[in-house]
Amino acid sequence: MRKNSILAIIMLIAGTVQAQQFGLSFSYFIPKNGYFSTPISPFSIRGLGFDINRFVALETGASLYRMSGLNMKDLPFESKDPLIGPNFTIFVPVELVFQLKGQSVEFDIKGGVFGFHGFGQRINYGNFDRAIRSYEGWLVANSDLNFKNKPGWGYHGGAELTVYVTDQVGVSIETNYLVGESKFPLKGSYTGGNTTLETKPVDYADAKIDFTGLEFSIGLIFNSGGGPSAPKKMKRRRR
């Protein structure tokens, strides 16, 4: 139900937008206990939406990330290294934006929900086996696992500062903190030990991908409407 509602909102916004701003921006994601991840340009559209009034807007968009590595949670053990990846992940936010506009500066406070789904998922067996060895106190471990990949969701909040160097050109810096998860149940077994080897079954039905971390972006805004103090306009499209 929640995913269907988010999709309906995105379709409504996309059908309403007539953007008067556009720009180029690059977003990066630093996951908790994961590897630095990069965007797949130009498959990213963010800040797509409309002004509800002068101070509040509704925005959405989508970005395709190349995730270098994400961690997992709700396992019998913890790992400081990512257990999943690399993969491609589609990220779709829906957010309310509170806009504070000056003559040449705009400061936005934003927050909302997001959905995501990873494609080409794979287990990082090197890190997984090291986590098993630490958990069991073994010298060696070798795992053989199967998984079910499912979409996830979460919530986020952040801020964006845009400084207009001219009436038509601005520089934006944005930071968001994301907290999300997706179910990723694991089944299989692992074999290991010290002097003798043994095999143990794996049935981690509650395992989840941890989509928690810091997203930041920097970009250029090209505005045909004359800067942040111009009359009310549709929100920008950024790629």
Image (cartoon, rainbow, N blue to C red):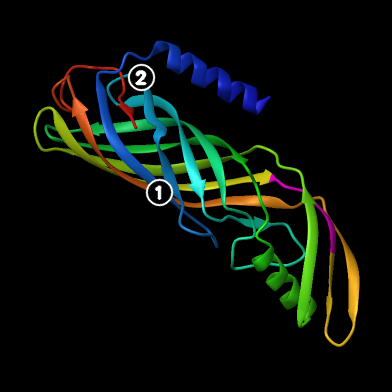
Point 40% across, 11% down: residue: 16
Q: Which residue is mark 1?
A: 28
Q: Is residue 143 magenta?
A: no
Secondary structure, mark 1, is: strand
> Does residue 223 sit above or below 86 in this rendering?
above
* Circle 1 crowding by C-alpha within 10 Å: few under 14, some 14–19, many from 20: some
* Circle 2 crowding by C-alpha within 10 Å: few under 14, some 14–19, many from 20: many
In screen coordinates, is 13 left or right of 206? Answer: left
Which is nearer the N-term, disc 2 or disc 1?
Answer: 1
Indicate the position of residue 35 as horizontal and vertical percent values: 50, 59
Residue that sits furthest to the left in the current view: 166
Q: Quadrant of residue 148?
A: top right
Q: Select label 2 or label 1 by which is in front.
A: 1
Q: Which residue is mark 2?
A: 50
Q: Quadrant of residue 150?
A: top right
Front-most of residues 8 and 158 = 8
- Pick the quarter of the image with the N terminus: top right
> Does residue 211 sit above or below 200 in this rendering?
above
Indicate the position of residue 123 as horizontal and vertical percent values: 68, 56
Marks 2/1: CA distance? 24 Å
Point 17% across, 35% down: residue: 170
Q: Amino acid at mark 2?
A: Phe
Q: Is residue 187 magenta?
A: yes
Front-most of residues 56 and 95 = 95
Extent of the magenta region: 183-189
**Is mark 2 in CB contact (under 8 Å) with mark 1?**
no
- Pick the quarter of the image with the C terminus: top left
> Does residue 6 sit above or below 212 in this rendering?
above
